[in-house]
Image (cartoon, rainbow, N blue to C red):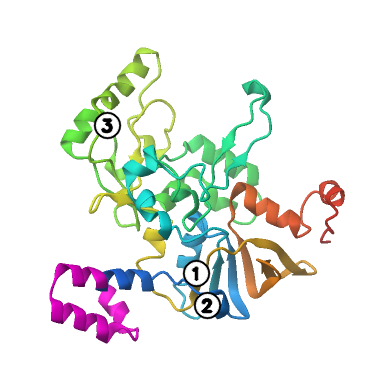
Amino acid sequence: MVFSTLRNTSKWLSLSSIVLLCGSQAARAVALDYGRLMSRSMINPSDISDSYDFVIVGGGLAGLVLGSRLSEDSSTTILVLEAGGTGDDVIDTISHPGLAYYQGLVGSTHDWQWKSEPQSNANNRVMNWPGGKMLGGSSALNGCYLVRPSAVEVEAWHDLINGMDGADNWTAEKFFAAMDKSETFTPPSSDIQTRGNIQYVANSHGSSGPLHASYPAYLPEVIGSWTATLGNMGIHTSTDPSDGDGSGAFVTTSTINPTNWTRSYSKTAYIDPYYRPNLHILTDAVVTKIAFDGTKATGVEYGEGKSVGVKKEVVLSAGPIGSPATLMRSGVGPKDVLDGAGVSTSE
């Protein structure tokens, strides 16, 4: 796959010559590394087209998945605008599960470092609200745990939007089927399963998706006492936590690729394996607002006075804070709030 990608570049001849002449593992790694770099669809600001069919605001977990899926149609053009960087400067921390958990990027410049309002039920404390500010978003920032919601949570969301277009796709049955499609599940080794007292049902997972779901190669022995200890307190153990029973105690899966023990996240799963000329990704591009003609989105403004046109749709994928903030800066939101901030509203 990598070499077929390289054949489509002007560098194929020189790189293949390096491999043939040197014949070393290091040289082959150079070629493979180059192929991986070329597959990222990254562009310079000067190379952006005047307009795209789709402009995706936010290159996090969902944004990169959407960009990848939309770009499967080679006749469609897509631009992903990400406020943060590529993450390449901290790739060791992102990729290494141990570093990600114990010495991660929370609190760094790769974290939005949001703060909550004072919480009345928590002694009016202000809570930290981390969010990934780089390609992959929080899927590149978190501790690699992959925890599915409970069916009752998904059904509650479905009931909330019932009657709206697409609501039928948000039943628990369809939601978990989509998660299965996205993942490749690898069971724990017998030693890890015993050490962690891990319970799972393989049929509740996917087997051929781009995102890897597995378990660490090492677990402290104390993990094996986790569910038993909670059981002694009257908290039940979920024997099938990935099929809708997310309550109780269980040892969850991790987003770890067991073939090389690195983090699996939206960038490595949906972007890095492919080179699609119709998909452009621009980092360090903070979106300021969406331009409208009446009720139709016609463009996206970003950076300092820059803009790009939109032929079909703007896809907001900037997270629970970024997406509504972008809408409000664009004049879409509660009128009293926008009037108070001096933002003209879109009728």
- Residue type at mark 3 is Ile
At horizontal 55% and vertical 61% (from top left) the residue drawn is 82
Q: Quadrant of residue 159?
A: top right
- Residue type at mark 2 is Thr
In this picture, residue 241 sits left or right of residue 49: left
Label 3 belongs to which residue?
A: 198
At horizontal 46% and vertical 61% (from top left) the residue drawn is 86
Are discs 3 and 1 less than 8 Å apart at CB? no
At horizontal 35% and vertical 47% (from top left) the residue drawn is 255
Label 1 belongs to which residue?
A: 70
- Residue type at mark 1 is Leu
Residue 28 visible in the picture: yes
Mark 2 Cα shell of 10 Å, populated few (<14), some (14-19), many (≥20):
some
What x and y, as percent, mark residue 192?
A: 21, 35
Residue interval drawn in magenta: 1-30
Are discs 1 and 2 less than 8 Å apart at CB? yes
Q: Quadrant of residue 311?
A: bottom right
What x and y, as percent, mark residue 38?
A: 37, 74
